[in-house]
Amino acid sequence: METTNPLRGLAAELDARGWRTALRAGTLTVTNPDAPRLTDAITCDGRAFWWTWGQEAGPADDIAGVADRIVHVLRTVTP
């Protein structure tokens, strides 16, 4: 997916997967639709996407891979 704004591209990818997103002031808030308490804000410095806790989520040019990672981290786990 080509885009000039990696956060918009990531939002579009996650939206297509049924996840809720909100892009405001350079921060993408992502929410698990099945568990609204599972949410995080993602930023991008043009080179990489970053989690709120400062860990890199993945390179800015790997939107599908980063979306996979976000979905994995914010997933619900059933016993």
Image (spheres, rainbow, N blue to C red):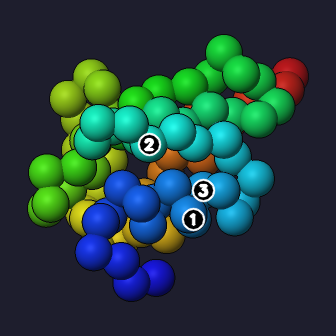
The answer to whether 9 appears left or right of 61 in the picture is right
Amino acid type, residue under disc 2 in the picture: Leu
Q: Whole-Å distance between the Cαs marked 1 and 2?
A: 13 Å
| Mark identifier at residue 33 | none
**Residue name at image x 77 percent, y 35 percent:** 33
| Identity of the residue furthest to the bottom in this view | 2
Mark 1, residues whose alpha carbon is within 10 Å: few (<14), some, or many (≥20)?
some
SS at circle 3: helix
Of the 4 image quadrants, the one containing the C terminus is: top right
**Residue occupied by mark 2:** 23
Q: Position of residue 35 (x, y in %)?
A: 76, 24
Discs 1, 2 touching: Cβ within 8 Å? no
Instruction: Please state which amino acid type lies under the numbered disc 1.
Output: Glu
- Is residue 15 shown left or right of residue 67? right
Residue 22 percent location from the top left of the image = 52, 39
Residue at the spot of label 1: 13
Residue annotated with mark 3: 14
Decide: is 5 above or below 45: below
Outermost top residue:
37
Q: Is residue 45 visible?
A: yes
Question: Dots 1 and 3: beta carbons under 8 Å?
Answer: yes
Label 2: few (<14), some (14–19) or many (≥20) C-alpha neighbours in 10 Å: some
Mark 1 vs mark 2: in front:
2
Location of residue 25 (image quadrant) = top left
Q: Is residue 31 above or below residue 43?
A: above
Q: Residue at x 46, y 82 (%)?
A: 1
Residue at figure coordinates x 27%, y 42% from the top left: 26
Q: Amino acid at mark 3?
A: Leu
